[in-house]
Amino acid sequence: MQRLLPARIDAAGLFLALTLAAPAALVPTEWQHRQPLEVAQPGLVRVALPPETFDRAQADLADLRIVDPEGRELACALEHGRDACAPPATQRLAAVQGFRGTLSREQTQLRIETGVTGRVAFLELATSAPYFLKAAHVEVSADGENWTSLGPAIPVFRQFGAENLRVEIGREAPHVRVTLDDARSRRVEFTGARVLPAAGSAAEPERTGVAAQVVRREEFAGETVLTLLLPAAHLPLAALAFEAADPLFMRRVTVAVRDVSDGTPRERTIGSGTLYRVALDGAPARARLEVPVDHTPATRELIVHVHNGDSPPLQFAAVRADHWPVTLAFMAASAGRHHLLSGNASARAPRYDFAAFAGDLHRAAATRLTPGSAEVMPGYRPAESLSAPALPEIPLSGAPLDAAKWTVRRAVHIRAVGVQELELDPAALAGARPDLGDLRLLRRGNQIPYVPERPALQRTLALTPVPEADPKRPSVSVWKIALPHAGIPVSRLVLRSGTPLFSRQFRLSERRESPNGGTSPHLLATAAWSRRPEPGEPETCTLEIPERLTSDTLWLETDNGDNPAIALDAATATHPVARLVFKVTGPDGFELAYGRREAAAPQYDLRLVAARLLTVPRQVAQLAPAPAAPAKSPIDRLLRSANGGIVFWSALALVVVVLLGVVARLLPKSPGSP
């Protein structure tokens, strides 16, 4: 549809132009949905599109049409609210014309010449300081002499991955003065600033807010992941607004959509920002609870990552999705019930002959309408010659498989039919091959095709370090850390200690089987850890584990020297998340098989439609509890408890001697023997 261009024409000319711009006849039954428009009188009509319309139309709204009571198509024009406030491509963050900082005993003052003649949207300060929180008082001036305050101090900070270096202006400001309070915190050096001019004198169009449903919340290592369901696909999003009950916080937030690149599932970031509620110098808390998102998602699902670090998760009461308004303008020649048509996948954007008058259409007064509820078009029949080829149906069953050689088979519980997401638990991760090539989903002897997914997420395992005394090394502290399963792909181990003062070098190892049948220590990681009794000192130490574990026990040790032993309060292991995505039509009879090392990785045709499968809302499937490991025989325990091969070879020699004695007694004796 044509974009609106500036022009001047009187009302009569505008009406005549739109009437003469009537397009060729269309076939309404090729559109799947229609929404009624009750036009009370002839004239210009502007229709505000509701979420229901976005959900049924093409992503670019190219299939929207207006028909009059007789079923004739009317020329119409889309008006996007985002275009009215988007700055030109040249209006991006630019270096300021002048920047100077002055220092006093208790404050830092920044004098900035913006170089902007009109309104300034905001300034963004620059600093390399990694960790700070400052109260910033902002003033503006036309001549650099007479200053006007913009209100109470705003928080400027960079902490725990979250930051706010933006100073909102929102007015003409050739000169800006920012005063930072240094009385209660360490001084921070700011090295420059960038400025964004305002988009013009026109006010930003009022955005429409709709509730976003939090359909899933998961806690991972250091972050919370929310799955949001929007009321419609194709909404031109402007921002996400969060309601958080926590009194004070700072969090970095990223918003993503599911995507597929070269057959590999991934998440594509479409927005990011910082949520905060901060109180400065006893003043009321200042907050920013909105994350900008300038994107039109193809689906209703959004993935929100809230990066917590070591802080507790936030409690969100609600999430609101704000989207830009989109209207459809047309000239009604008569009163009566018109219809808004949508849902034609083969339709292309029309080209109407009134582009020269579009500017006047945008400025002209109009009757505003909201369409009624959508209904299925009576006699709907898509155009066969023009319709896009239908996507192939996702296959639900694969080839038969005899799973007798797979060592583990676990039931999979399905709550509701549809596309499923099955996350592998630690038992499955430990029992399967590192590449997950031996995994098979089964139902009644047939394979269920799936697509593997490895998101950039980590799960945590709470572990308990148990002190182990070593009489031969009294100055060395040793802890035994048991894992729930042998071979879990642990990527890091985080230690926590409340001991206030120490400096130690830690060594992490496991005991691996040696060729002679015994076990020997294998070093996994080392780390230096120091603590002083001062605020802000780290209570945790992280050891990165670069290789896959083979046992179910970790051994941690440190040399205390002439110092007292320290206490370890807790340990937390993290491991990567792995999922299987598949589709089912029945709720029972599913199981997951793994544990066959020589099995070849499956090749399913499902990968051809992976993009469709991985970008739709999912149900969450659950694995049944893992079966208990079989008890080991006394001989197995004896052999595995040996530190070397002495016990093994001694036992073997004893068995050989006994067998030789038995054979000697059974042999026949010679006649002359006593």
Image (cartoon, helix red, strand yellow):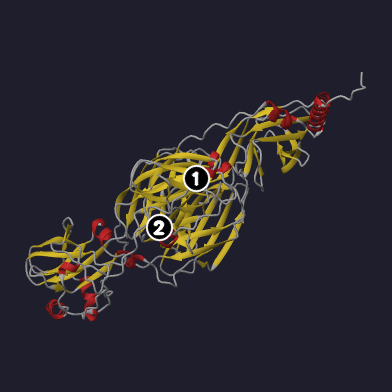
Q: Earlier in the sequence, mark 2 or mark 1?
A: 2
Question: What's the residue at 57%, 42% (across, down)?
Answer: 431
Instruction: Left or right? Give the position of 342 relative to 319.
Output: left
Q: Place residue 81 in its image quadrant.
A: bottom left
Question: What's the residue at 32%, 67% (across, down)?
Answer: 84
Instruction: Left or right? Give the position of 501 relative to 255.
Output: right
Q: Quadrant of the N terminus?
A: bottom left
**Looking at the image, is 541 positioned above or below residue 607?**
above
Pointer 1: residues within 10 angstroms few (<14), some, or many (20+)? some
Q: Place residue 72 in its image quadrant.
A: bottom left
Residue under label 1, please give it.
Answer: 403
Q: Place residue 432 in its image quadrant.
A: top right
Closest to the observer, 40 or 470? 470
Q: Quadrant of the C terminus?
A: top right
The tally of labels here is 2
**Looking at the image, is 82 positioned above or below residue 673?**
below
Question: What's the residue at 17%, 70% (across, down)?
Answer: 330
Closest to the observer, 66 or 80? 66
Picture coordinates of residue 210, whole percent (x, y): 29, 51
Residue under label 2, please give it.
Answer: 293
Q: Are marks 2 and 1 in contact (CB under 8 Å)?
A: no
Q: Secondary structure at mark 2?
A: strand
Picture coordinates of residue 277, whole percent (x, y): 45, 43
Q: Secondary structure at mark 1?
A: helix
At label 2, the amino acid type is Val
Picture coordinates of residue 3, whole percent (x, y): 28, 74
Picture coordinates of residue 73, whole percent (x, y): 15, 73
**Camera sees residue 64:** yes
At label 1, the amino acid type is Ala
